Image (cartoon, rainbow, N blue to C red):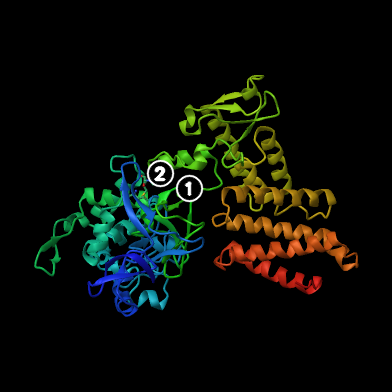
Amino acid sequence: MSAEGQAGNCGVCGQPATLKCSGCKEQYYCSKEHQKSDWKRHKETCRPFKVCSSSELGRHVVAKRRIEQGEEILVESPIVFGPPYGRTPGPMCLSCGTPLPLMAVTSIATVRCQHCLWPSCGEDACMEGKKTAHTVECAILRLSRQRVIEALTGGQVTEELVQVAYESVTPLRCLLLQRIKPEHWRNLMSMEAHQGQPHSEDAPRVVRFLREILNLSKMDGTLMDEGKTGDVRRWDFSEAAINRVCAVLDVNALDIRLPGPSDGIALYANTCLLEHSCMPNTRHKFDDKLRIHLSSTRAILPGQHLHTMYTHILWGTQQRRDHLKVTKYFDCTCERCSDPTEMGTYISGLRCLACEKGYLLPDQPLEGVLAEWKCNNCAVSGEGIGVLGGEEVRSLVLGLGAEVEKTLEARPPSASSLEDLLSKLETLLHPHHSHCLAVKHSLLQILGKTGKMEEQQRKEAMCRDILGVYRALDPTLSRLGVYAAVAKYELHSVLVDVWRKKWEDGNSDDEARSKIVEARKCLQNAINLLSEENENLPEGRLLDVAKSSLEDLNRWAKLDE
Ligand SMILES: C[S@@+](CC[C@H](N)C(=O)[O-])C[C@H]1O[C@@H](n2cnc3c(N)ncnc32)[C@H](O)[C@@H]1O
């Protein structure tokens, strides 16, 4: 609590007060005792930010006080979560999220929830009617269980029908908030929906599944309950309500990993209000209760907006802006999108085939495909003809992207296929182009295994180079942590391969020492960057590998601090 010259009124007794809550810098108290006694109430609203609104952004979030780098800004539980909507979810246990095979849905012999007959993983906790995520919809699903079972196990069942069934679960959970948590329902209905935009084509089939197969149309307008004040409330399962819920999920839902683990989505009342920037000042992570923890990636001053990122940080401007336009219906104008070099990285740059010295960059990046791309060497000096139209650039980049995707799909891709592709890409693109970075990320995990000096030098240079690009786009590596950890781990491994022998042979000159010290630092950095990763995912497994490599290095190198 801090003392302020300007007085307010104590939040407990209403008397004039000069002490302010240091969490939100808004609430006054006359004494520490009164602050302590008020904490239970005040903590619900004690936040370092406020929600504002503008015609350009809609609702957005602004810092009320200085927020320090790395400070936890907010922790909140989802107002709803479930299987993905708008992407095709696979079958899963609706209680715990465990993925299930398609057969589990269509087979009569499957283990099912004893009440609604939807497939279950069979774990006791999911079968015994204990309170789980599924409890909410189970009561509604059991009303239509015969129809669903017939639809899903009948001779005509298609994979598409199964997908629609699972895709409809989260919209159904949203609709049921009308009764279970009316305040969450009101919150959800106040979220941006961009009605009238060409939303995903999935809404009509979800409407059909919910209204016709689950029979919600019969319940539409029926009595839900009488509110505490005696007011009569009726279910709204109209087409309009379902469409609105789908549109809200489309614009606001965050991707999460359900505990199962299956892919899922969730809505968060406050976090969903954050605007987008391609240089975001916050990051978030989820805990095992699906609570979101939002923290700052750099210091945020009072009055500055808080932003998150809705798209992929390693895509170039054209790709990011196209994606944001199609999925979130706005044109991004952030500092990165406005800068043709994208913070000096040239991640969208094309080689100029006219002068073969410079790089083509969008002249007016915010104009999208209307922008001309001009060479930063010959078009600027007026000596050459290094100019391309935005549409031509888009089709070139899309075509090369498809090739990159195809090559990276092979698991694992061969070193020679990556080398061939990279040399083709580098004749057309800047070496830091997003396509080149994607190939290099895979290649540097393979390079150097032959022990040839030339290859090792190339790997070392590639790791250092790629880390420089990551730092320029994400100075605190809070969003590119896993990519950076891979590069750091590989840099450590090539330094050890080259220098360990010299070090152990007693040639411990300054250079050998500094390389081994650097290798150890890389491992420590990688471990820090991966410290919160899930141990069941590849990044969590890399964490274990990095930890044991560090133990190993400490044992043989015997470096004193
Ligand atoms: C998840 S919602 C954010 C909250 C929303 N503004 C509201 O009022 O509920 C995403 C929507 O906010 C708007 N938005 C977010 N970031 C923006 C930005 N950088 N520029 C313009 N509009 C933005 C867009 O309309 C986008 O579809």
* Image position of 505 (left or right of 32): right
Three-letter amino acid code at the position of disc 1: Thr
Looking at the image, is mark 1 or mark 2 earlier in the sequence? 1
Residue 15 in the image: state x and y as whole percent: 23, 72
Q: Residue at x 46, y 47 (%)?
A: 277
Would you place residue 187 above or below residue 469 in this image?
Answer: below
The residue singled out by tag 2 in the image is: 327
Give whichever of 22, 119 is nearer the camera: 22
> Where's the C terminus, which quadrant?
bottom right
Give whichever of 118, 491 is nearer the camera: 491
Q: Indicate which disc residue 82 carries.
A: none
Residue lying farthest front? 5
Residue 525: image quadrant is bottom right
How would you rate the neighbour count of disc 1 (Cα within 10 Å): few for under 14, some for 14-19, many for 20 or more? some
The residue singled out by tag 1 in the image is: 311
Gap between marks 1 and 2 measured at Cα = 9 Å
Q: Secondary structure at mark 2?
A: helix
Residue lying farthest left? 230
Would you place residue 290 above or below residue 436 in this image?
Answer: below
Give whichever of 151, 559 is nearer the camera: 559
> Where's the N terminus, which quadrant?
bottom left
